[in-house]
Image (spheres, coloured by chain):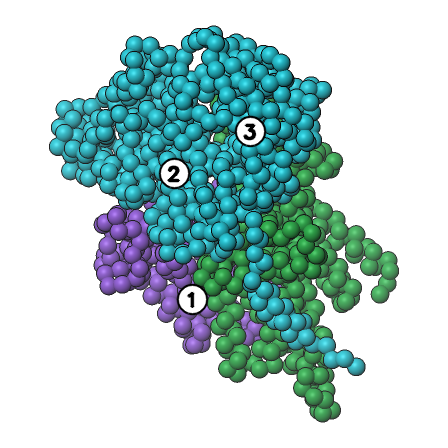
Chain colours: A purple, B cyan, C green
Amino acid sequence: MIPLLAVLRSAWRKPRGRAGAVLLLVVILAALVGPWFLPDPLAQPDILQGSLPPGPGHPFGTDQLNRDVLARVVAGARVSLSVAFLAVMLSATLGAAVGLLAGYWGGTVDSALMRLVDGALAIPRLFILLLVLAAWERVPLAALIFLIGATGWFATSRLVRAEVLRLREEGYVHAAEALGARRVHVILRHLLPNAAGPLLVAATLAIGDVILLEAGLSFLGLGVQPPAPSWGGMVLDSKEVLVSAPWVSIFPGLAIVITVLSANLFGEALRDAVDPRSA
Amino acid sequence: MTRWTPRTPLAALVALFSLVTGVTGQSKHENSIVILTGQQPTAPIPTLMEGQAASAGNLELADQLFLRLAGLGPTLLTAGDRGFVPLLARSWTRRDSLTLVFDLDPRARWQDGVPVTARDVVFTFERARNPAIAPRLVALLRHITSVTAEGERRVVFRYSRAYPEQLYDATFHAAPLPAHLLDSMPPEGVARSSFVSQPVGSGPYRLVRNVPGQFVELGANERFFLGKPSITRVILRIASDPDARLNLLLSGQADAMDNVVPPLDNMRRIQADPTLRLVPVPSNTVGFLLFNQKDPGNPSQPHPILSDIRVRRAITLGLDRQLLVRAVFGPYAEVPYGPVSPILWIRHGAPTAERQNLGEARRLLAQAGWSDSDGDGVLDRNGVSLRLGLVLPTTSAIRRQMALLVQEQLRQLGIDIDVQRLEFPVWIERRSGGKFDVDLAATVQDPSPSGLSQGWTCSGGSNAAKYCNPRVDSLIERAVLGLGKPDPRQAWTDVLRQIEADAPAVFLYAPSYVYAVKRRFRNVTISPASPWQLLREWSVAN
Amino acid sequence: MVGRELSGWLLRRGLQAAAAFAIALTILFFLMRAAPGDPLSRISEGRPLSPAEVATLRARYGLDQPVTQQFVSFVGGLLRGDLGVSIEYGRPVTALLAERLPATVLLGGSVLLLNFTVGLWLGVRQAVRRGRREDRWLTTASLIGYAMPSFWLGLVLAWLVGIQLRLLPAAGMQDPLLSLEASFVERSIDVLRHLVLPALTLSVVSIAATMRYQRTAMLEVLQLPFITTARAKGLPDTVVTWRHAWRNALFPVITLFGLWLPILVTGSVFVESVFAWPGLGSLAAAAVWGRDYPLLMGASLLVAALVVAAGFLTDVAYAMLDPRVRLA
């Protein structure tokens, strides 16, 4: 078993992991404290001015309603990051639960769950979400988080199941059961901690995917609803001034790239720490 | 042995890429034009443009393929006979107040060479007045009692009553169809026949090909009796997204674009392009905030907040509409008086719109019992906040921008507006189901003011807000029939005054549509009723 | 390779694939039916319907039957190749999908081609130069590529290359002014010019993944003893790399095909709408905006079928190349 703290420490020692962690922390910090120092992301100080190019006062320029783009990018970070973290937590939990259940019980439970996962994996996640979200007039944020989380556990459950099967083969479970441990105890004390490493790696890498997914949905108008600023929604709104005010599109897009990149850098470093072969 | 590595295809790929990007000098097509448009035409045939097919895509294309008896001239005056120019009909006269006689131009030919005769006109109006085929036209042509031929070239229209727009009704709604090709078909069979994909008309252009989702190609009608068009090849390129249309225009993939939508930054961007110019044309659109008179939760009850005229008036006076219009449209729109788009002739002589008056707005709200008792910046009354939902379709860039501006201005008055951008079909559903507080609506109007009865009379077909004032109903009826006042404009001004006094809506903007056209085209005339209608008169500069 | 063993394995794997598709179909159907809102309101364009009209419409669309019955008739229709009629276009869904498929195949095919050339080549280079500056640079580049939202990259490229530089068309699939008499070569070049930007956008994301996989697979092979032997024999580096190592490092990458497909399809929804490419992706996006459920359902089903088929085919290809797989 690899203690989580050691994994994190080992990831931190790699330059790539450190770079990812620092970048991600900067984004999180900006999302937390940035809004105190920046103008109201909804305020339209001078609507006759429209979109102003980046310059003093507005480092990222203003959008077509004269709203400060930097303030909106920072406010969007709050939305995008909280959607990503909450949805990933939900899908990791679901994935772990299903994987443990299938791997530990085996038999019919296992094959039924895995067939379901096979079927679900055949439909790209975006299409499942499109089908459900298209039915909504305006998607509440909580529902969006729930749906993204609820459609993200399929691959994770397979991963956890494989880990459980490996542990079973190693005789780990038998030993514990022979000592008279209860099932719940075996699952929580023996299997879960062992599966925690791969789970953490999968969850960290999933953050980037979810940010991209949420941005894509918002770009299609099905994700975070305005006036709440989200990066994908900002790119959607900026499309109409792409030719006259490209900065309105470019900065939220860069924010997506940087955040996803940092999550992935850190996630890869974690994976190398858990499974050194892939380095 | 040849050494194959993935380098080989890579090199080929790089070579191909440079070749492909190198071929930029698109061959110049002398007498052609690529026009960007938003809607795919499906059945551009008069009498078939019903229901969903009554789309701008069909109507605009039909105007190229089929010629009307007479055209609406530049004054757009639909009342009386002076505003019209001859097309298929060379002249018209009145026998009495109920009989209108058209004499067809003997040079007029169908695209297959057969002359256009009175029989074609009679045939077309038989179809147009058949409720099973064309319910929309039947309603529009309800005052016409008969259409008969007198010989080959003379058509007689008879009406049930005398009214100012007789000529308009006979010419605007249904362009003649070729009877010799269609009268052997059962009326309902035309829609499924090959005539829809290969129409034969009398207009300046004929259909060459239709590539669904991409473009429609037209060719000049060599036999056109009013003169062969100078531009011989017309491509109507379809891109439903206005941003995509703008990109195609600015990347040089098109020559003209319909309706460049705000934000203004885009108009400035086009102006900065030396090969393009902007052509503003009065639009047939009027945008307004429509107040639901009924409770969205229970349509049998009045709206809990908006049924109070003081609140509606306060919102009207609380908005700086002149500023809103300038911010969204720049010089290309004005604030209307009543539901009147720039295309309607009745706007001449109407009063000007009221200006913002925050003091009066606050006084009215206080009088109606609204005050900010809990200090949260939003007015309230008996524990209920003054919060209103504003629905709009997310497809309209103008309305998206307008909604956010309105929200901000009303926030300063203590009114909380919840902007609800809805997908178009959902918006339609909410609007027609009466499930809204305020609707940011934009209606498209015919050139005739008689269309106002649709939205603003008690039984009007598109009266989504259930606004009902019998006095307005009777004023409209009198204006349509030309009763009372000698000048029809005055009768219509009385209608508008009454509507403004009732404040069923805040009339926000009456825009010009701004078209972008390459400078190399000469004699560019864009008609407000159908933008590309006079394309046959355009030419290309050398 | 024992024939009976292989056919038994094929049958099992085929049944598994069929089961996955059946489950995907069931999931999609019930998701759609569970959606809030009345499908009829969309059909009636929001016009209030009389009770008689409601009854007729419900009967016509089979909505008056119990859900299980509806499911049975839906599956029956599917077997006959009938996926219903699109609300937006008023035409059979299958016809619309068939009409849009070629454009998507062209786009997806070019992206795969780029993956198999540029992606594999870069991945191999990285493995050969493991840890050196080039490897690090390419790793960073691929991670950045993987972090790009395709819709944003598409917009930026359309703006930069199409509008600012005017090197390539910013949208569409063909130049409508190219006359009907234009030669095949002229027309191909025209389509190719339109293809470059969407294919590039879509490739950036998928090539990043290909590079990473190829690099890992190649590294494993390069550590094997026979490579050392080959080098010891004094064979030139390129020969060892490509003829010995790469051939063996190719199969794990083949399995990627099953993985690429969902990425490509998802990406094409965004990229095709940004570039007005007349394929399945832009059709699906339009179906979302128009709340056109039958069309959206048809597109999702087609995608699911493609994903299952791709997974099956890669497994088969892999099994043919490497018999050990069947034992697993």
Q: Residue at x 54, y 23 (%)?
A: B89
- Element carrying mark 3: loop
Q: Is residue C12 left or right of residue A130?
A: right
Q: Residue at x 36, y 27 (%)?
A: B344
Which mark lies nearer to you, 3 or 2?
Answer: 3
- Element carrying mark 2: strand
Give the labeled residue for mark 2. Answer: B281
In the image, residue B238 lies at what x, y percent?
54, 44
Q: Chain of mark 2?
A: B
Give the labeled residue for mark 1. Answer: A262
Between the residue at mark 3 and the residue at mark 1, the CA separation in whole angstroms equals 63 Å
The three-letter amino acid code for the residue at tag 2 is: Val
Q: Quadrant of the C terminus of chain A?
A: bottom right
| Few, some or many residues within 10 Å of mark 3 (<14, 14–19, 20+) | many
Q: Is residue B52 visible?
A: no
In the image, residue C157 lies at what x, y percent?
48, 61
- Element carrying mark 1: helix
Give the labeled residue for mark 3. Answer: B67
Q: Is residue B202 above or below residue C209?
A: above
Which mark lies nearer to you, 3 or 1?
Answer: 3
Q: Chain of mark 1?
A: A
